[in-house]
Image: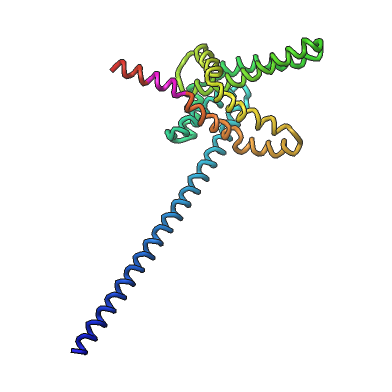
Amino acid sequence: MAVTFASRRFFYIFRKEVFHAIEWHVIIVENNRKESRKMNWIDNGVTRFLGKVADFMFLNLLWIVCSIPIITIGASTTAMYSVMLKLVKNEEGYIVKGFLKAFKENFRQSTLMWLLYLVFGIVIVVDFMLLRMMSPSIRTVMQVFLIFMTILLISMGIYGFALQARYENRIKNTLKNALILTVAKMPYTLLMLVITVVPVVVTFLTVRTLMLGFLVWLLLGVSLIVWLNSLLLRRVFLVFEDIETSEKAEKI
């Protein structure tokens, strides 16, 4: 009886230790799996991030190359917004194909819009140069007016090319909508002005910032600014998307 009792106790202890060993093995394996998943998630995150950076750099290069004739800056900017607005909505496909397609489809209207902006820009620059010839009292008033017109022109440029990239419309209506959005969406307008203008101003502060800024602009300056603006424009354009949705619902 003593032997039988001892045997049972031995098997009970042995079985208990085996179960403990199995439990610890399961815990260790599960922890390894979690660590592996965590590492895979980190690896995937890093890979996606590097992929986005590479896309931005390539788009930036495309924009520079397609803008070299100067007259095509409008079409290049519209193409950039076309790709970025899809990117922020997770609708992106082949970025090169999408850029070149948007460049071709919007070339005429975007170029005409760019020429209008360019003419008004040149007029403003000339007026700034003529301020020296004016009396102090008139000069102050004109400075305020010209600064206001510069801000308005840049704002309408941001909205104008983005609208052209996203929606089919006549130039007149696109510019009208750009003006309306500039005023109606003032918080977004101010944010996009900061995003667009501040990097340019900082670039020309010193020789050092100019050299560093040149490298940044060459690599991903324009694409990064357009991407940041597109994040805000996505919210702004919800107004038009709601209108389109309601119109489709009425037709049905």
* 89 and 114: which is toward the camera: 89
From the top left corner, tell me how far across and down residue 72 is, in percent. 58, 23
Numbered disc total: 0
For this orientation, the residue located farthest to the left is 1
* 26 and 74: which is toward the camera: 26
* Picture residue at 62% right of the left edge, 28% below the top: 194
Q: Is 105 situated left or right of 6 in this image?
A: right
Q: Quadrant of the C terminus?
A: top left
From the top left corner, tell me how far across and down residue 84 is, in percent. 50, 31
Q: Is 155 situated left or right of 238 in this image?
A: right
Q: Quadrant of the N terminus?
A: bottom left
Note whether 215 is above or below 171 in the view shown: below
* Picture residue at 69% right of the left edge, 14% below the top: 145
Q: Is residue 240 magenta?
A: yes
Q: Please name the predominant secondary structure of the magenta segment in the image.
A: helix
* Picture residue at 26% right of the left edge, 83% below the top: 10
Q: Is 63 situated left or right of 87 in this image?
A: right
From the top left corner, tell me how far across and down residue 77 is, in percent. 56, 26
Camera sees residue 215: yes
Which corner quadrant of the image does residue 126 belong to?
top right
* 68 and 88: which is toward the camera: 88
Camera sees residue 108: no
From the top left corner, tell me how far across and down residue 205 is, in percent. 74, 33
Q: Which residues are magenta?
A: 237-244
* 96 and 214: which is toward the camera: 214
